[in-house]
Structure formats: C-alpha cells, structure tokens
Image (cartoon, helix red, strand yellow):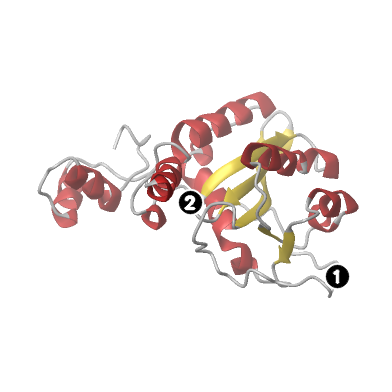
Amino acid sequence: HRESKEIYGAPKITRILQREGHKVSERFVGKLMKENNIKAHYIKPYTKTTKDCDFSSRLHNILKRNFNPKAPNEAWCTDITYIYTEDEGFVYLSSIMDLYSRKIIAWTLSKTLEVEEVLKCLETAKRRRKTANPVVIQSDRGVHYTSQKYKELTKGMIRSYSRKGNPWDNACIESYHSLIKREWLNRFRIKNYYQAYQLVFEYLEGFYNTVRIHSHCEYLSPDSYEKKYILEQTN
C-alpha cells in the first residue's frame, strides 16, 4: 500500500501478492486493510472546470468508443485538464494516451491555453513514437483541436472527434485526468506552476506509466504491457 503511494485498494494489492506467490483472497486482504485502517486514497475533484464545445457539424467520431486497439500506435486520444494553484491560478495539463496500453506518451503543463503551448504535447508524441501508422487521434471539439495548427500537426493521421455533449467518447483520457487528481494532486495544496509540474512528473513518470498496474493491461503497468507486446512480436 505504501509502495503505491497509498493509492491501491484490496483488488490491486491482492493481485500483486498473488503474483509474488502468496495464497490470499481479495476478501482476506480487504479484511486486513479494514482492521488496520488502511484505505485507498480517493479524493473527488471539487469543481468541474471544462465544458463541451461544438465548432463544426462536420467533425466525425471515427473511433466510436473502440478503446481496445490490437497494437500500440493504432489509436491515441488527447485532452486538457485544469489544475488550480494558490499563487498563480490555473495551469493546464495536456496529455496524449496510447489506447493500447493506456500509456501517457506525451504531456505538457502550460501557464496559458494558447494553441501553440497546448499542442507542444502533440509534437512531443510524434517525435517519441516515430510511427508510420495511420494513427487515429481522438479529441473533443475544443478550439485547440479544430485549429489550423492542429490540422497541420495531424496531417496523415485520422482525426476523430467526440460528439457534442458526449464526454464518454473520449472516456479513457478523461478518466486518466480524473485519476491523477483524485489519487494524487488533490492531496496537496499546490502553490504554483513549479510545484504542480513536480507533482505531475512524480506521478506520471515515476508511478503511472512505470509502476501502476492496470486491469486493462492484465494487471501490468503501461510500460510493461508494451514491452510484453514487443517481446511477443519478436518471438
């Protein structure tokens, strides 16, 4: 429980113990946790900071909630969330997720919502993945994702947009942004951009991508799940 930053509950702890050779049930682990007052951290976001926007009736939902591609780089999704700081107001976390592994392949934290700042995240993702596949990239209909700059950066990709008023069409990245807040960020009184960046970096690079097990990934971390895919393809 401590190794997971006090985030894991009985289901995930049970899986890890079983993997290490312990014969325990989820019910037994839950009972021990309750007796010792050990709980998974879950702090609900205190405010809704985003809203749905519709800029064009010509934007189509290509992905259609097919959140389980068969290989990395077949489908990405992207979104922005707001993080409140006491001294500097909101800062803005942009993330891109590979839907195969749920790995966050690129992220940026910016002080403004300028299109150029937000879309640096996409430039990073393209540079890191170096994929020739016709990637489907899912987003909402916000101004950043309907901009000329976004169209230029996604040339050769297949742009897919959530339907108006349907955040479930982009549920995986929405879920991740909710997760980082309730498991981690909402534990802290964040003073400024620098502290927010440090916290995001610690959670994402030191835990979420590399350590945190995910039921979608057969209870492996996103990094381990992608390595498993590469090994299987090599074999």
Q: Position of residue 88 (x, y in %)?
A: 74, 31
Q: Residue at x 80, y 43 (%)?
A: 113
- Judged from this view, the residue extending furthest toward the bottom is 57
Q: Are marks 1 and 2 in contact (CB under 8 Å)?
A: no
Q: Position of residue 225 (x, y in %)?
A: 41, 47
Question: Dot 2: few (<14), some (14–19), or many (≥20) neighbours within 10 Å?
Answer: many
Residue type of the residue flagged with mark 2: Ser
Could one spot residue 40 in this view of the protein? yes
Question: Dot 1: few (<14), some (14–19), or many (≥20) neighbours within 10 Å?
Answer: few
Q: Residue at x 58, y 26 (%)?
A: 198
Q: Residue at x 24, y 49 (%)?
A: 15
Residue 221, image quadrant: top left
Q: Position of residue 57 (x, y in %)?
A: 84, 75
Measured in 3D between alpha carbons, the distance from the residue under mark 1 to the one under mark 2, in whole angstroms, is 31 Å
Q: Nearer the viewer, residue 47 or 70?
A: 70
Q: Residue at x 85, y 50 (%)?
A: 152
Secondary structure at badge 1 equals loop
Residue assigned mark 1: 56
User: Left or right: 97 with respect to 28?
Assistant: right
Residue type of the residue flagged with mark 1: Ser
Q: Position of residue 54 (x, y in %)?
A: 81, 68
User: Left or right: 10 with respect to 153?
Assistant: left
Q: Quadrant of the N terminus?
A: top left
Disc number lying in front (1 or 2): 2
Residue assigned mark 2: 101
Residue 168, image quadrant: bottom right
Label for residue 142? none
> Upstream in the sequence, badge 1 or badge 2?
1
User: Left or right: 41 with respect to 89?
Assistant: left
Q: Is residue 162 above or below residue 153?
A: below
- Judged from this view, the residue extending furthest toward the left is 23
Secondary structure at badge 2 equals loop
